[in-house]
Amino acid sequence: MYSGGYAGKILRINLTNKTAKEEKLPLEIAKDYIGGAGLGIKYLFDEVKPGTDPLGPDNKLIFAPGPFTGTSLPCASRMAVVGKSPLTGAVGMALTGGYFPAELKFAGWDAIIVDGKADKPTWISIKDSTVRFHDAAGIWGTMTFDCQQMIKDNLNDQNTRVICIGPAGERLSKIACIINERRAAGRKGLGAVMGSKNLKAIAVKGTGTVPIASEEKYKTARSEMLKAFKESPVLYSAFSPAGTPMVVDLTGALGILSAKNWSATGEFVPVEQLGLDAQNSRKIGKEHCYDCPVGCSQMKLAKTGPYAGILTEGPEFETIYSFGTETGVANLDAVIAADRLADELGLDSMSAGVTIGFAMELFEKGILTPADTNGLELKFGNDQAMITLLRMMAFREGIGDILADGTKAAAKKIGKGSEKYAMHIKGLELPAYDVRGAKAHGLNYATSYTGADHNRGYAFQEIFGIPVPWEVDRLAIEGKGKLTKWNQDVRAVTCDCATMCAFILDTALPATSTQNTAALMDAVAGLTFTPEEVQKVGERLNNLAKAFNIREGFTRADDTFPERLMTEPLKDGGSKGQLISKEDLKKMLDEYYADRGWDTETGVPTRAKLIDLGLGYVADLLKV
Amino acid sequence: MYSGGYAGKILRINLTNKTAKEEKLPLEIAKDYIGGAGLGIKYLFDEVKPGTDPLGPDNKLIFAPGPFTGTSLPCASRMAVVGKSPLTGAVGMALTGGYFPAELKFAGWDAIIVDGKADKPTWISIKDSTVRFHDAAGIWGTMTFDCQQMIKDNLNDQNTRVICIGPAGERLSKIACIINERRAAGRKGLGAVMGSKNLKAIAVKGTGTVPIASEEKYKTARSEMLKAFKESPVLYSAFSPAGTPMVVDLTGALGILSAKNWSATGEFVPVEQLGLDAQNSRKIGKEHCYDCPVGCSQMKLAKTGPYAGILTEGPEFETIYSFGTETGVANLDAVIAADRLADELGLDSMSAGVTIGFAMELFEKGILTPADTNGLELKFGNDQAMITLLRMMAFREGIGDILADGTKAAAKKIGKGSEKYAMHIKGLELPAYDVRGAKAHGLNYATSYTGADHNRGYAFQEIFGIPVPWEVDRLAIEGKGKLTKWNQDVRAVTCDCATMCAFILDTALPATSTQNTAALMDAVAGLTFTPEEVQKVGERLNNLAKAFNIREGFTRADDTFPERLMTEPLKDGGSKGQLISKEDLKKMLDEYYADRGWDTETGVPTRAKLIDLGLGYVADLLKV
């Protein structure tokens, strides 16, 4: 039935009953959703009922690599983690790379679907088709790197790959992430979902290989992809040696590197301290995901002060923002230390940094006082306070308990007008790009089904000037609806369903990714797609995810920005004077909904659109 | 030639020339020294000339497991690391366990002898007989756990075992250690020797096995050993679940758990906070060395304050002393954190803690002031200052630079009468047992060839009341010479040469270890020994090591104690009123030298004794 790419098998794990069973992956799901997030969200929509408590036993946590994961195709060892997000209440989806995704395929699984709740801390080992449940008493409470090592030691197999939560996930922090190796499925609090199930870790070891439908076609498709890599003007020359930190300088120059809880974008621009040259001064090596020739991960070592000797894989651009510019900490070694600590604690470095920046602004404005913070001087730029607070958040100590659930929940608890400073959309903390100077970024943040998520439809056109699918003025409001739809659909299928690395899409395949995916689906899986059909998979996913959110009660009013972005123009820098007014946002949303074939009034997918996408049953459920 | 146990091969590595060559291990060395420390010190004596700078290229660093290491014999995966100590100027020897020692044997080597100095930071990988030199730029500066992981990633082999130094060894701290897995070849600053050679790490992977001369004899000898394990009244019942921390309560009750830089032994006895019950409250699991059924290593997780979530393998009894009672820190979570940090930094936890205790007493006495310590309030009991100072020592920051070389060197630099508070013998910081209430411990500290080293002739009789080889009164002065000789010789051969775990000697084989070793040498190596001949190997080693020290200028005057132990009686507790006066020490030394067949005046081995031990060439060199 499956001639390659897929095992055709899903592993169902119920933690309440400690059962593991094999289930067929219907071929239709592979055809309609390809894999990864597509597969995960399809199961989420179908199986997690509206109103389900994200931290209750009925939420599901789905780990789904793609059809190319585990083959020799470069940049495909990625995996989506899907569940209802405790942070947003919407679809929670985050991707991770490294080695775990490939190993899961070697073990013969297209996905793991976890539900229920263990009666006590538990971890699971998977060796091919053998699944064992283990008492996690011996690793509960550990940091994520120690946890992985202890599991390898316990299994007496150093080649096992492990995905786990840290103290933050155990304590149900709504910004807790899931860590494998030194990587995170970072956002939307899926670590708390794992914690709520009393599931500390999953270890996997596989001895199989991923079959290829047509070796000949595969060889050709793979070569073409590698050729595109070589022909990329930036992939090997700039991106491979620098990684995402190269965007620090770029966004700094464009005046869109958000700073001090979005109060000082364009004014506080510490490119000298945190930009690429500074980053390179701390770089000691690189890391690669499974079978990746690029190796964009930069290993950096802090050199000064109390941070000397601390190593991290990263910090990525978004973390340089969250623990750097956002908190006013122009100290790269502190950013490195915070990045490592967040990984160890199992906290999403983005949401954690933004939440700390939020607390700092509240402190500076007197909304939080030293009496609230156990005397911690939470001023912008206080790097040691940032590190201390980060730990307090993971362990829910003092003010850390309030901040452990992100800005939205914290603002609700703190009150006193603090919501004004909570930089989130749908509960998800904002990424680095100040959308006041990059409008498609803004529209994408506002409309992404996961909340303010740059990864769901990254407007590379606005940052790198790449004229694909057309030339774009980053400051223009018009035309951003169509662009955002294109970005979201292409990225959804390429990176989220086919689980190809997003950085490859941006740097080497911006114009050809749907052709590339079509060719690979034919070669690897023996399933025929046109590039248009590929793109439609992305569109289908975005519609299905949107439908999930609508079913949960989200409305057009949730597709919005924090007040500040609509009322405070940027005061300095390369985007000085810019903002996205409420009027601008309305314009963009109207255009976007229309381009999506959604009801322009409500932002709800129309029956016609859903039927066109083969989602008639969704239209029935939504009663549209 | 070698029928089992030995590969008969030594790996010579010269870092100056980046050469690796195989050399025969002469059978005589196996016969006269068995292996481990015996082998190492034999090469050290023969090849490292008097007056050699311990941190110069001419010092050698020898890694030597024993003949049973890598077999299925339990508790034998241990290895001696030998070099001239930069801390003492005497023989430097420290043992480590875990997996590296066995892996080295699987690779087919009885020892590695490293000399020279690399022109830039380097690491070495050994895979069976293939040796490669690698640029260490990508791992220089890293903590020891990160370093090990990065090397495994670099070699794309998670099963490789690594031994390495941390930031302390790189900075030539004379109390730097060498780490493999979570274990240390801890004492005598051998990490600085590695650092002085620009050698960050050695990775080893072996695919061979260790041959057994007579499977039948081996089966019998192994069974008898396991039988002794089972019959031990403490090994599985008490020692396995508790590990060395069980000694905290015991020494606390005896009034010999040294405290506050040896100023408050018997007075400051925080057994409730640091003793076995407290330890068990932090225990989450156990670890085993290769093929060890005991697993005395306890994995502990800190629970409170800024230490929550920090994991360590340990803390062992000696670390509970050094970072606990010695520094007045009755906070187990801080001790756990310091233990982990010391391992990560590559600092000997014992010498580091004692040195911090020393600095605290100087601070309390006003010899060090806040101006000297960058404002650090170095008072006894200040756990956070301890942690901060530990890091400063590894990185040689501020006062940490002075303290990074241990108490003796620090006292010399600080002056102002501080030497009085420097608790070391021959430069090596004192272990936990307050010898004022355990006289054989005292004599052993004073006479050990490595300085104040409980491991070179541990007087278990005084602590556990085991009447082997005879009954002992811990407070008696008389008879301790003979006892110490027996303890030193038996331990030297069993634990240091044959590299059997010391804890097995103490708990299961106190009376039978020489018979056990004789039977195993016959079974594993096909070399015939009587138990007396086995013991003589230990005696030979102690004489050869003593000869090395004499050649370096050590005299009877160095076999002594810090003034405090001879003039300040214990003020409280189970050994109240006790001290070892200068007169007592003289008596014990006289007896000891006589029992050793050494010149009682000078403490120098006589020609007759050396010839009796087959060390005529040593007599010639010493001109005795």
Image (cartoon, coloured by chain):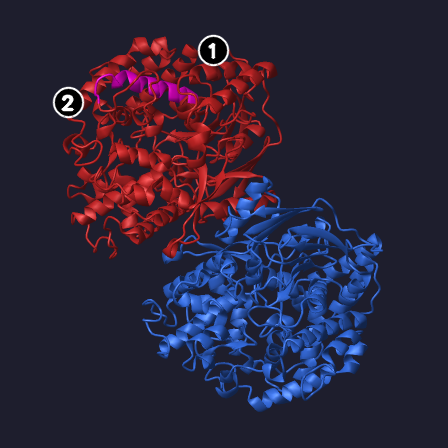
Chain colours: A red, B blue
Q: What percent of the width, then of the height, locates residue A240?
A: 45, 33
Q: Secondary structure at mark 1?
A: loop
* Quarter of the rendering containing residue B110: bottom right
Q: What percent of the width, then of the height, locates residue A480?
A: 26, 19
Q: Which residue is mark 2?
A: A583
Tell whether position A477 is magenta: yes
Distance, label 1 to label 2, CA atoms, is 40 Å
Q: Which mark is residue A388?
A: none
Q: In the image, what residue type sits under mark 1?
A: Phe
Which of the two discs, 1 and 2, labels the residue nearer the N terminus? 1
| Region in magenta | A476-494
Q: Respond whether the residues carrying marks 1 and 2 are from the same subunit.
A: yes
Looking at the picture, does residue B608 appear above or below residue A174? Answer: below
Q: Which residue is mark 1?
A: A529
Instruction: Single out the residue that lies furthest toward the bottom.
Output: B583
Does the rendering let one see residue B455? yes
Give the letter of the chain under mark 2.
A
Foreground residue among B620 and B594: B620
Residue at 30%, 20% in the rendered image: A484
